[in-house]
Image (tube, rainbow, N blue to C red):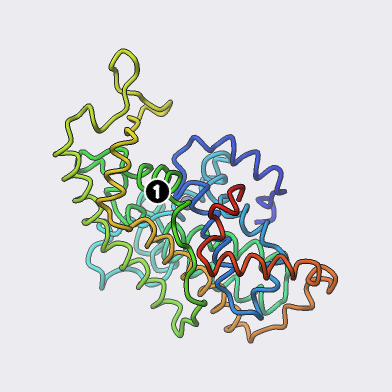
Amino acid sequence: MKNFRMRPRLIALLALIIGFFTLSWGIVGHERINKAAVMALPKQVQVFFYNHIDFITQEASVPDIRKYALNYKDENARHYFDMENFGPADAFPQTLEEAKQKYDAKFLNDNGILPWYIEDMMAKLTKAFKDKNRAEILFLAADLGHYIGDAHMPLHTSANHDGQLSDQKGIHSLWESRLPELYAKNYKLNVPEAQYYEDVHKAVWAMINDTHSLVKPLLDIDKKLRTSTPEDGVFKKDAEGKILKTKYNTAVFSEEYAEKLHKDLNGMVESQMRKAIAATASFWYTAWVNAGKPDLSTLDAPAVTQRNYPALQEDLKLYQKGDLFGMKNQND
Ligand SMILES: [Zn+2]
C-alpha cells in the first residue's frame, strides 16, 4: 500500500492529466465530499482531520488515479458493485472472503467488490486509530471517503453502469461529473454531525441498497427527457452540424440538455452528495469510536493545531451556512 502514497503535487498533476477521463464523481465531487466530511465530524476527531484537510481533500481522487493513470489492476473492482448480477439479495456473500469463494476473479473484476471493500477498509481504519498511526489514519480515511462517494452514485451499483443496456450511453459521466461541475457551486453541502453506526456491516448495505433504489428513477428520468427532446437538442454539434465527441468517442451532451436533466432529477445529485458527506463523516467517526476513542491531539504538534484553529472556525462558519465551496471560496 505504501507504494501508492503520493505527494500532493504529484496528485495534483496526475489529477490534471486524467481530468478528461470519466472519473467517478469527477474530481469536483470527490474532493468536496471529503472536505465537507471533515466539517461534519465531532470536535474530538475534527481538530486532527482539519490539520490535514488539504491531504484529505486532494487524496479523495487518488483511488481513481490508481485505476486510470497507474493502471493498477486490483483497483478497478473496488469502485462498483453490479448488484443485478449477484442474484437475489439474500444470497449475496457477506464478506470479501465469501465473495472470493463463491465467484472467480474475473467475475469479481467485472462485477465489482465495492461493499465488501468498504467494510475491509473500515477494519483497517479502526486498527490504524487503535495504533494511533497518523499516516495510516489519514491515508485510509481519505481513500475510504472516495469509495463511500462511489457508493452514492446510483450507476456504480448497477450492471447498466453507463446506460449501455438501455440505449442511454453517456449518462454515467453526465450525472456524476458534468452535472456536479456545472451545478455543485450552488449545492448546500452542510449536513448534520456524524452519527455512530452500531453495525458497520448493516450500515454499508443500507447505503448500497438506498443508492441502488435510485438506478431506475435516474434512468427513467433520462429516458423520458431523451425521448421528448429532438436529437439535435440532446447533443452538442460542431459548426458542420456533426455531433461532438470526446476523445473517448462518447457524445458530448448540450448545455441545454444537461440543464434540463438536472432540473428533472429534482435535486438527486445534490442529495446524493449530501448523503455521501454524512456517510463519510459517520464511517470515520464510527472507526474512531470502535478503536476506543483514542486521543488524537497527541498526533500533531500543539503549535500546528493552534495555528490552524482560526481557519477551522472560519471554515466552520462557511460550512454551517452551506457556503464552504460557495461564492466566498471559489478557488476551492
Ligand atoms: Zn471511484
Mark 1 surroundings: few (<14), some (14-19) or many (≥20) residues within 10 A: many
Assign a secondary structure to mark 1: helix
Is 7 rendered above or below residue 188? above
Residue closest to the eye, 187 or 130 = 187
Q: Single out the residue that lies furthest toward the left.
A: 228
Tell me which corner region of the image, top left, top right, bottom left or bottom right, holds residue 90.
bottom left
Mark 1: which amino acid?
Glu
Q: Residue at x 43, y 26 (%)?
A: 247
Q: Residue at x 51, y 77 (%)?
A: 194
Q: Which residue lies under the disc numbered 1? A: 176
| Lateral position of residue 294 relative to residue 290, left or right | right
Q: Position of residue 231 (x, y in %)?
A: 20, 29
Residue closest to the eye, 32 or 146 = 32
Is 160 rendered above or below residue 316? above
| Lateral position of residue 228 relative to residue 256, left or right | left
Q: Is mark 1 within 8 Å of ligand 1?
A: no
Q: Residue at x 65, y 43 (%)?
A: 12
Q: Position of residue 277 (x, y in %)?
A: 48, 65
Q: Position of residue 259 (x, y in %)?
A: 32, 43
Q: Residue at x 63, y 75 (%)?
A: 127
